[in-house]
Image (cartoon, coloured by chain):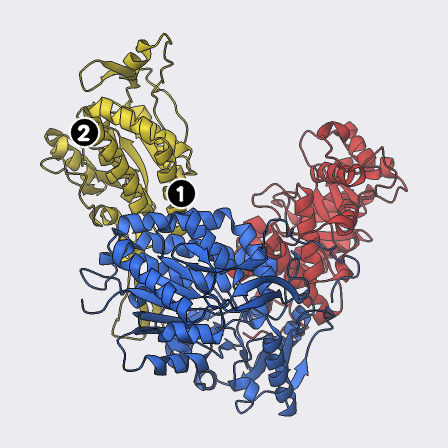
Chain colours: A blue, B yellow, C red
């Protein structure tokens, strides 16, 4: 239904604001250094497949160096610094992120493929807010309810995914530093650039050397980092499969672990829902960030009495989604982050069709270069279909129906995951009744995909353990029983 | 004193007129009165505005007008604003140190340390805005099919008699916790040492703090405080800086509309100590909400 | 209550309770969600060709309005001249849709506008409060129509609406519609007094069921006047009403729309909520006065490449 009368002209955000180096070293001990074994890989713009920069691949000796730098900073300065002073460094970082937020937003969209509208209006404000929030905790830890004399754990190894590169960095680094830990963080191999600019921000903030170390690389690098004997704490966000492997690696050790893994959230629409807002919530729930969201509302559970009307409205609304250049300010749906991810989305979508579900996408022209997948819904999906059970991590919605509230709860909970859920109804008591029965770490009522640094986030069951954000987010970075 | 310093050169200094701070503006007292303020040696420093009961009345009107916006602003926004206050104060660090030293005497280093502590205290409270509800709020496990939770909310307009001795650190220590939680205020500055308070309001006025959230009066505590204590549109009264001789009468006046009263200490507290959360929760109400769970 | 916007019952206007059952059976509007949607659409970036089109379209949709106690024949004539030819230096600039005046000034406007194509709209029904006897309101309408008004902007009885006397509101619109004869009827909901989006939605349906050709947000005399979320809710209502009945109803936000940016946000709202079918002066109007000059300044900027100033547009 894109307008013929009023087609928006291209409105690209300027790339002039970012200055990408041709190659990047590792950030260890407060400076950029060359990797010991000299291996590199390339990071590309998924919307054009153009190479953005050459990135260092950290090997075992690099991980040794990074962990040693973090240990030195922990023992020498950060672990014993007063919370009041730590807070000021974190406030500085928050402020510099605000100052450089447009640059970081453009860079994020270039490296990740997400629409500039989202990196500008969602990711970056949340990143800055997260540092602000935890800056405030640094000198208030004794008020957080985790004992009278809270202490840091030590060196934290942190591995983050590619879907919200800088935001996941903030969720990891801000609470760790606020509590007095030092960190070695590995960004995803397809989206390392904003983490490397963040390293520069640490320099601008005058953060003591070694408090934050950034090592780039792929799965092997991550494996070496989380398995390194010099780390005291591991925090991982990513797939359930890798999370399970990390849990096994750490078994029998004293290392602390927090995991934020996959999801298959049910978005439950009751027959008395505010319908237009519910449709917005369904759209935002699954098409926000191309569905590359662990808490995405990927299963729509709609009450049968209104299913047809909701779906009619959903299809009409989907027809207005604008897919294309992530840097265009009017783009709603950007590029899929990598060829590998695109292949997985295609594979599972094909399976959905093969298993008998009905596939629908709005008329939607895909750019020739880059990785793209149209917003897609599957109707006629049952609990037995793989697209109702497996995380697709793409712009693909599976639609199921229910007749009674109990049936909605049963279906919603019938999954190994338990990260998030949505409920739509005009009746307050039904919201709370539903929330009470959902086995999920976050329940959104008449809204979806809302995040705030003050609000804890994390999953039940195979969606992981530990919480990020809020007062609860401190617990993962404070020593136990000391 | 700056005046003397300037006299050492040939240049004649330009002196500042110290006025009141009401509703984001800097008016003189409506009464047209001033009183001479001395430095720590007793030499003349400046003429400060001598606020009247009508100035107090205007300040309460301004505080009430600002209450809706400030109390409903997100906690995050309030934190940002207070942090901005700290940033602006840091830029005036030397000016504050000079003024505090002039007002309080002692060693210049001690004055500078008090200013540093004052700035850090603003940062401390900036960080509390979005955490206080998480520390003192609760989900209450009532025995029934109800979701029941308690949240703190600001009391309203709080009149503060600022500490008499500590002209900046003491002032900041009583003021910031009250506005951090969303109250708006009318502050009666230290009677003998009001000048750093007025300079503080210049920092507040340039820090995105909405006009009327803080209203600063200079003058005689014995003259103005009773009007604030008895004012029916004032909800809280912080008597930290009130002379002990006035305490009982002020508390009696405050009882008419059951103001929340913070009593004065026997001696002025040591403001360099860890402030804790005590002052943060003094002017908070607790609201508990019951909601059924049912399909 | 269900989501289904089922067909309107034939006896919907048989009583207050029948109307209440229908209007209160419409799906609710979530305030936070509706406002978030309007805010999201307001971040659309309209550049170059799209902006040129939007500026000219917005000009052509304006109901150029003067509704002051101090209005004179001279003021109305000046406004008519401006409406026909908003930019005297540029013949390519479109005329506005209509000139909107009080009933007693309709003859002056009609005489000046002649066959220019610019319509005469008149407020009526004891605008803006609507607090008069029905007979007085109907006389007001007949008077304006007799004087040559092409369009009548009536106000609903907000008091009756808030009392739940929906039938009174309905009957009044029906009678005004009859008194309009061939004139188009715009029904002003005065959304600023209805207070909730649920009420805006119900009043929109009530006005459409009663026969209004347009639903209009505001008189411009009450704050808040038009807002993006209110207009969003009304656009959703006309969309759903057409889906249900097949009849298309226009929408007119009025009051508080002052800048080109404002106007473009409304056009984006129309485009992405109800689509091209409403993107014309026949189905969407902007009730405004100072907006026109800002559109002209922006238009000149697009034409010359440099910023213009208030000395380069006419003041009326």
Q: Is residue A79 above or below residue A57?
A: above
Position of B193 relative to A431 (above/below): above
Which residue occupies 43% across, 85% down?
A416
| Quadrant in which residue A455 is drawn | bottom left
Dividing the image into 4 quarters, which one contains the N terminus of chain C? bottom right
The answer to whether residue B22 is visible is no
Residue designated by label 1 = B81
Location of mark 2 (residue): B164
Residue furthest to the top in view is B10
Q: Chain of mark 1?
A: B
Q: Are marks 1 and 2 in contact (CB under 8 Å)?
A: no
User: Measured along the vertical axis of the image, is residue A72 above or below residue C145?
Assistant: below
Q: Residues within 10 Å of mark 1 (few under 14, many from 20)?
A: some
Number of on-image labels: 2
Say whether residue C287 is left or right of residue A482: right
Residue B292, x across and y down, in percent: 35, 71
Residue B38 locus on image (x, y percent): 22, 17
Quadrant for residue B232, please give it. top left
Task: Tell me which label, 1 or 2, sits earlier in the chain.
Answer: 1
């Amino acid at each position: 239904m894109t307008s013929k009368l009023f087609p928006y002209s291209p409105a690209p955000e300027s790339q002039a604001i970012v200055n990408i180096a041709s190659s990047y070293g590792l950030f260890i001990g407060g400076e950029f250094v060359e990797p010991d074994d000299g291996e590199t890989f390339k990071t590309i713009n998924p919307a054009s497949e153009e190479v953005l920069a050459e990135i260092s691949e950290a090997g075992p000796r690099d991980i040794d160096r990074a962990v040693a730098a973090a240990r030195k900073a922990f023992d020498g300065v950060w672990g014993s610094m007063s919370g009041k002073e730590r807070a000021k460094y974190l406030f500085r970082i928050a402020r510099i992120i605000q100052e450089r937020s447009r640059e970081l937003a453009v860079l994020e969209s270039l490296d990740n493929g997400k629409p500039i509208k989202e990196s500008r209006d969602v990711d970056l404000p949340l990143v800055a807010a997260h540092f602000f929030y935890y800056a405030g905790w640094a000198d208030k830890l004794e008020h957080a309810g985790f004992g009278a004399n809270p202490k840091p754990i030590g060196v934290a190894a942190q591995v983050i995914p590619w879907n919200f590169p800088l935001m996941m960095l903030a969720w990891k680094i801000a609470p760790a530093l606020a509590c007095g830990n030092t960190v070695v963080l590995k960004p995803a191999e397809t989206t390392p650039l904003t983490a490397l600019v963040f390293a520069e921000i640490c320099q601008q903030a005058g953060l003591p050397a070694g408090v934050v170390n950034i090592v780039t690389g792929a799965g092997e690098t991550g494996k070496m980092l989380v398995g390194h004997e010099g780390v005291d704490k591991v925090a991982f966000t990513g797939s359930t499969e890798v999370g399970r492997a990390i849990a096994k690696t750490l078994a029998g050790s004293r290392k602390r672990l927090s995991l934020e893994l996959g999801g298959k959230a049910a978005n439950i629409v009751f027959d008395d829902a505010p319908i237009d807002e519910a449709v917005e919530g369904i759209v935002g729930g699954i098409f926000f960030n191309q569905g590359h969201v662990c808490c995405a509302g990927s299963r729509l559970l709609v009450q049968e009495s209104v299913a047809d009307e909701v779906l009619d409205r959903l299809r009409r609304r989907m027809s207005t989604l604008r897919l294309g250049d992530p840097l265009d300010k009017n783009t709603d749906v950007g590029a899929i982050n990598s060829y590998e991810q695109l292949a997985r989305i295609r594979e599972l979508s094909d399976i959905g069709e093969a298993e008998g579900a009905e596939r629908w996408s709005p008329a939607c022209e895909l750019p020739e270069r880059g990785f793209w997948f149209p917003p897609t819904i599957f109707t006629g999906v049952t609990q037995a279909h793989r697209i109702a059970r497996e995380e697709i991590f793409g712009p693909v919605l599976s639609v199921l129906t229910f007749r009674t509230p109990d049936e909605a709860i049963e279906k919603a909970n019938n999954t190994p995951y338990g990260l998030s859920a949505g409920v739509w109804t005009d009746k307050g008591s039904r919201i709370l009744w539903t929330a009470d029965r959902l086995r999920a770490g976050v329940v959104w009522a008449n809204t979806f995909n809302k995040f705030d640094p003050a609000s804890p986030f994390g999953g039940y069951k195979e969606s992981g353990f530990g919480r990020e954000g809020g007062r609860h987010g401190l617990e993962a970075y404070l020593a136990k029983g000391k | 004193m700056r005046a003397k310093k300037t006299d050492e050169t040939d240049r004649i200094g330009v002196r500042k007129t110290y006025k009141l701070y009401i509703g984001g503006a800097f008016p003189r007292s409506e009464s047209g009165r001033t009183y001479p303020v001395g430095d720590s040696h007793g030499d003349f420093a400046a003429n400060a505005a001598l606020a009247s009961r009508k100035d107090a009345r205007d300040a309460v009107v301004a505080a009430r007008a600002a209450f809706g916006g400030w109390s409903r602003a997100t906690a995050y926004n309030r934190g940002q604003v207070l942090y901005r206050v700290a940033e602006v104060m840091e830029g005036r660090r030397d000016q504050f140190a000079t003024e505090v030293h002039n007002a309080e005497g002692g060693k210049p280093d001690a004055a500078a340390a008090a200013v540093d502590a004052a700035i850090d205290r603003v940062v401390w409270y900036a960080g509390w805005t979005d955490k206080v509800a998480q520390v003192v709020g609760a989900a209450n496990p009532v025995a029934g099919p109800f979701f029941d939770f308690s949240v703190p909310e600001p009391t309203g307009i709080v009149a503060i008699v600022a500490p008499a001795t500590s002209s900046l650190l003491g002032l900041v220590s009583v003021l910031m916790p009250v506005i951090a939680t969303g109250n708006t205020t009318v502050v009666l500055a230290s009677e003998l040492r009001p000048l750093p308070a007025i300079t503080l309001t210049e920092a507040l006025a340039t820090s995105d703090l909405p006009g009327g959230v803080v209203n600063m009066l200079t003058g005689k505590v014995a003259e103005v405080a009773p009007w604030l204590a008895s004012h029916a549109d004032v909800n809280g009264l912080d008597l930290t800086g009130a002379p002990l001789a006035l305490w009982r009468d002020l508390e009696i006046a405050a009882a008419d509309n059951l103001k929340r009263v913070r009593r004065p200490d026997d001696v002025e507290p040591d403001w360099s100590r860890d402030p804790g959360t005590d002052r943060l929760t003094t002017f908070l109400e607790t609201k508990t909400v019951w909601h059924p769970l049912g399909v | 209550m269900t989501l289904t916007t089922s067909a309107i019952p034939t006896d919907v206007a048989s009583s207050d309770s029948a109307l209440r059952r229908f209007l209160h059976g419409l799906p609710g509007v979530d305030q936070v969600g509706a406002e978030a949607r309007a805010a999201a659409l307001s971040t659309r970036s309209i550049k170059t060709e799209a902006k040129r089109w939007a500026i000219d379209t917005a000009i052509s949709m304006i109901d150029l309005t003067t509704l002051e106690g101090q209005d004179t024949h001279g003021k109305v004539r000046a406004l008519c001249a401006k409406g026909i030819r908003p930019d005297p230096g540029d013949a390519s600039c479109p005329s506005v849709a209509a000139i909107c005046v009080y009933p007693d000034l309709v003859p002056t406007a009609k005489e000046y506008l002649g066959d220019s194509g610019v319509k005469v709209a008149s407020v009526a029904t004891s605008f803006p409060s609507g607090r008069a006897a029905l007979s007085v309101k109907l006389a007001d309408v007949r008077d304006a129509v007799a004087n040559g008004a092409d369009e009548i902007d009536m106000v609903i009885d907000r008091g009756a609406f808030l009392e739940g006397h929906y039938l009174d509101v309905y009957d009044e619109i029906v009678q005004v519609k009859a008194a309009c004869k061939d004139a188009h009827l715009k029904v002003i909901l005065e959304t600023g007094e209805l207070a909730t989006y649920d009420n805006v939605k119900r009043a929109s349906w009530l006005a459409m069921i009663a026969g209004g050709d347009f639903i209009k947000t505001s008189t411009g005399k009450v704050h808040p006047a038009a807002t993006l979320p209110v207009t969003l809710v009304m656009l959703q209502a006309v969309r759903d009403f057409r889906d249900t009945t097949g009849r298309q109803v226009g929408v007119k936000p009025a009051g508080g729309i002052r800048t080109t940016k404002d106007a473009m946000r409304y056009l984006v709202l129309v485009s992405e909520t109800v689509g091209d079918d409403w993107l014309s002066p026949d189905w969407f109007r902007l009730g405004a006065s100072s907006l026109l000059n800002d559109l002209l300044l922006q238009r000149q900027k697009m034409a010359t490449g440099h910023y213009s100033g208030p000395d380069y547009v006419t003041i009326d």
